[in-house]
Image (cartoon, rainbow, N blue to C red):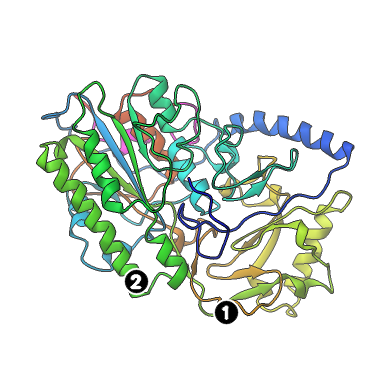
Amino acid sequence: MAAVPPSDAGDSLLSPSGAGRAPPRKSCASRLHLLLTAALAVATSYLLLLRTPLPAAPAAAVGIARPLAKLSKPAVILISSDGFRFGYQHKGPTPHIHRLIENGTSAATGLIPVFPTLTFPNHYSIATGLYPSSHGIINNYFPDPISGDRFTMDSHDPKWWLGEPLWVTAADQGVQAATYFWPGSEVKKGSWDCPDKYCPHYNGSVPFDERVDAILGYFDLPSDEMPQLLTLYFEDPDHQGHQVGPDDPAITEAVERIDEMIGRLIAGLEAKGMFEDVNIILVGDHGMVGTCDQKLVFLDELAPWIELKEDWVLSTTPLLAIRPPDGMSLPDVVAKMNEGLGSGKVENGEYLRMYLKDDLPSRLHYSENYRIPPIIGLVEDGYKVEMKRSNKCECGGAHGYDNAFFSMRTIFIAHGPHFEAGRMVASFENVEIYNVISSILKMKPAPNNGSASFPGTILLPSE
């Protein structure tokens, strides 16, 4: 995936943002402590797989999966429309998306992303069934506090990417997979070596219709070469959402364009007589909220309580992540920041709260990894955090906030022989999707944070 300089333009694969800064130098004692912490974190990440508090599952589907008419094996096309906030499907004419909804299964009030609600953590959670604390992609950009190496959206070294994504599960079990762009798909793991035929390297300039046609082309291959698992990625409407927020007509145009691509895919599969045989799962990675009303918190206004240095701050908006230098009391830093924020003397200070990462709400699953900075700030929906005032444009859209905010929800729409027609299910977390796809393709799933029983509540059983 092409490296793009960080900016406020967004965090889709096409236009990333939020680069981290290099960590401060560590003393030998501190490095030893971090090494021990890292070893413990790896062990803990596996233990996390065994404890996964989840929302109540929907009732089981009725009926049985439809037999395949033309394909000899089940197939899944997993499609991501970046930044597709739940509700966008009703913004304008989207007949093809609604065809999938009306004849398939969808989450009635949207899909719940993982925290932080950013592109890379969420795409990799969908692919692995793991929370970021387990799969290691804790932000779009971040430094490793031990090595000093920095993860970017162009990092393909397997050391960053923990867990087992769907395409690796498939390759390891003799199931053919193809990825037309997906974060992590270019990383060589297990039996997956990102083969040229099935894994084009990310290029954001490839037109959407060419991507769809490439996916359709795989269905012309001989049966033993035809992929059963396919991924497809679109940068829109995230790209527009960062520029203009979620309520601009440009969003409606972008959503209608995505609908056209879904229509192109459906038409192509119908022409091959395969549409009813293929399981299409359309998701987003996160939602979007407008930031055009000067909802800003400036960290330099905390100077009377604590002077924050820029090299402590690894990211600001909307995930405030801080790693103070060695020797500083982390609880004191948090206490002084919260004292200032609650004093009434910091503009919008009441909308930001600081936490030691171990004190974050457990529902966020964002503490048990040494890569996560020790101090995290949670800001209210639509608010932004900056080091100091500037003259840059503050009007647009953002995401990355607490995944409990409804504005961060996205879509889950599934159609195919394994999904009941016209069925609405309760919202669920995106870590469940890995097990759902594994079940359809009859693959043994790797350990993950999803529920082993969840697929049985959303899929039609096979005969």
Residue 386 coordinates in the image, percent (x, y)? 66, 69
Front residue of 247/199: it is: 199
Nearer mark to the viewer, of 2 and 1: 2
Which residue is denoted by mark 2 in the rendering? 250
Please state the extent of the stretch shown in magenta in the rendering: 446-461
Can you tell which mark lies on residue 294? Answer: 1
Residue 364 coordinates in the image, percent (x, y)? 57, 49
The secondary structure making up most of the magenta span is: loop
Magenta stretch containing residue 382, yes or no? no
Q: Residue at x 48, y 72 (%)?
A: 396
Comes first in the chain, label 2 or label 1: 2
Amino acid under label 1? Answer: Gln
Q: Residue at x 30, y 41 (%)?
A: 59
Front residue of 58/405: it is: 405
**Side of 402 relative to 39 (left or right):** left
**Side of 290 relative to 262 (left or right):** right
**Side of 281 relative to 136 (left or right):** left
Residue 404 coordinates in the image, percent (x, y)? 50, 57
Magenta stretch containing residue 460, yes or no? yes
Q: Taking the image as drawn, is residue 98 in sight?
A: yes
Q: Residue at x 28, y 35 (%)?
A: 76
Q: Are marks 2 and 1 in contact (CB under 8 Å)?
A: no
Q: Please tell me whether mark 1 sits on a helix, a strand or a loop.
A: loop
Front residue of 148/49: it is: 148
